Image (cartoon, rainbow, N blue to C red):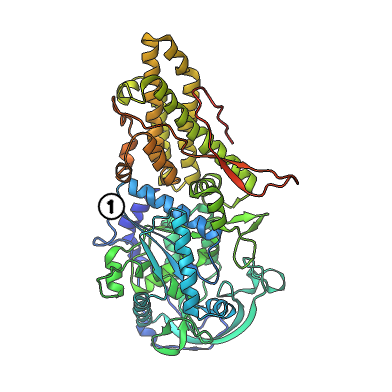
Amino acid sequence: MALKMQSIQTSLCALSTINKPTFNFLRKNANFRFTPLFSSSSSSLRTPMFCSCSGNSNDKYVLTTPLYYVNAPPHMGSAYTTIAADAIARFQRLLEKKVIFITGTDEHGEKIATAAAAAGSSPIEHCNYISQSYKMLWKELDISYDKFIRTTDPKHEAVVNEFYSRVLANGDIYRADYEGLYCVNCEEYKDKKELNADNCCPIHLKPCVDRKEDNYFFALSKYQKQLEDLLMQYPDFVQPASRLNEVQGWIKTGLKDFSISRAAVDWGINVPNDHNQTIYVWFDALLGYISALLEDEKQPSLQNAVASAWPASLHLIGKDILRFHAVYWPAMLMSAGLTLPNMVFGHGFLTKDGMKMGKSLGNTIEPNELVQKFGADAVRYFFLREVEFGSDGDYSEDRFINIVNAHLANTIGNLLNRTLGLLKKNSDSTLAFDSAIAGEGNSLKINVENLVEKANMHYQKLSLSSACEAVLEIANAGNVYMDERAPWSLFKQGGAAAEAAAKDLVVILEAMRIISIALSPVAPSLCRRIYSQLGYLNDEYIFLTWNDTKWGGLKAGHVMPEPKPVFARIELTVDADGLTPEPVKKTPKSKGKKAKAQNA
């Protein structure tokens, strides 16, 4: 997929020859009265651009999460998106890409003003508090973002104003009356045919309200043919395939222009040519992906932001905001004459009791509580390993504990601990051979090399669950090898058998060294502890690359520290009433012989 993504960046210029459809402001299904701001002669179509020789070079990788809406504190859904984005960013850094990982908060709109009023605070006080809560959670989850953009930042407002003016100058903004069913939670007008019974939004399960406004509109329908051709020629622009099908279905039914301002909302960026209206949150927030790129010392302008690193390599989003990113956003960029991102990836929902988790539904899992109970590595690993990326996934605490204990504590952690215990007992914690020599003709070495290549391929394809599985298989293979070779018995025999046992330990510890790199995008703190237990410094860990997964890193004479468990099992305490109040972590004892590995 990485190669395909690069091909979009380097060769999509062919779309500059797309036929330009005619555009008529009067459409049959539109419920508005229009006042054009430009004559039809000024509203020429701009063709999409996908390549930029001076822009996003092959060694640069820009990825984004959504800018999270601050009407309430972060929930597990937003944490899941950010954990996945962080794993992708960390992997790309291992590939020695110049990563710019962007996240942030969307802080304008009707819901924000309402939430602030309900809390008895001003909108900006509310935004400051919730935005900070995101930053605190990202710190707890080991999120390594490079840019955190807030849409209340003055530099962002400057970019939005300039972008709006460019689209306006291209003849793609006009004024009109509109009446329709409006979902306050989506902040979007809905077609009646897409609503549930009683005009309820299918995402938020709340009734839409009838609303009539005099707003400014973006001429989305003008870009129907260009979007159709884009997705036909470059289907990897929207992934996974199920999301592409959704987007193509929306476009096929006919695109309608959408309102990009609100007359009744004060909390927002003023429309540049009409201060009685504020810019619609999506026409505001999407620009955060560009304004985040501004360097502090640079003048805040659209040109400076784009020149810094645009376009994005990947927009990572939940499927509920797919339409905004895969239809609205590329059309907006086409209108402004800007390069399109390489890919929009819409992952599935996390569910609880079979329902999507969301702030508006009131059934969220509190991510801070999960991290406090189980730690960041456990939370990150479970959701990336157990949810097939792109599909929906369900959470249960029992499943969580079983998976984390089996994979991280038993399969990985215990293998390392008992191997180091044997090394201490029989070799004074010192390696007797180079791993390159110990691994000559060794079946585990060959297996590890194949699995590392599989993990690399899966990471490249954003198949994060499969990448986790490939790395776990290295540990499984190490456990099998340990049991088959029984080095504790070989040491007792002495001579050539003891020498073979010493090689066996080196081979297993080399596999653990490779695991500490290959799993680091998913469980960075755990992998740092593994690397430390192998006798390396933190500074050495920081500068690791994927090339360091090549066999042969451990050298003869290398001394390992005192064995310490790298991941404690989670045990549930049961009280007199049979309840299980709080999980507690239980430190496993080091065992020279096999502690049977569990697999889920």
Q: Nearer the viewer, residue 401 or 220?
A: 401
Q: Quadrant of residue 362?
A: bottom right
Looking at this view, is 209 or 514 the one in front? Answer: 514
Q: Is residue 221 visible?
A: no
Disc 1 residue crowd, few under 14, some 14–19, many 20+, Cα 10 Å? few
* Quadrant assignment, res 207: bottom right
Left or right: 44, with 400 as reference point: left
Q: Residue at image x 59%, y 44%?
A: 584
**207 left or right of 494?**
right
Identified at 65% across, 70% down, the residue is 195
Q: Position of residue 364 (x, y in %)?
A: 61, 60
286 w.r.t. 171: above or below = above
Q: Could you say where residue 589 lies in the image, as x and y percent from the top left? A: 52, 31
Tell me: residue 571, above or below residue 344: above
Q: Amino acid at mark 1?
A: Asp
Q: Is residue 226 visible?
A: yes
| The one of 1 and 433 positioned closer to us in this rendering | 433
Task: Answer above or below: position of 592 versus 371.
Answer: above
Q: Is residue 577 left or right of residue 493?
A: right
Q: Residue furthest right?
A: 577
Residue 574 x %, y %: 69, 43
Relative to residue 11, is residue 356 drawn left or right? Answer: right
- Residue 245: percent from the left, percent from the top? 53, 57
Q: Residue at x 64, y 79 (%)?
A: 209
Q: Which residue is disc 1 drawn over? A: 59
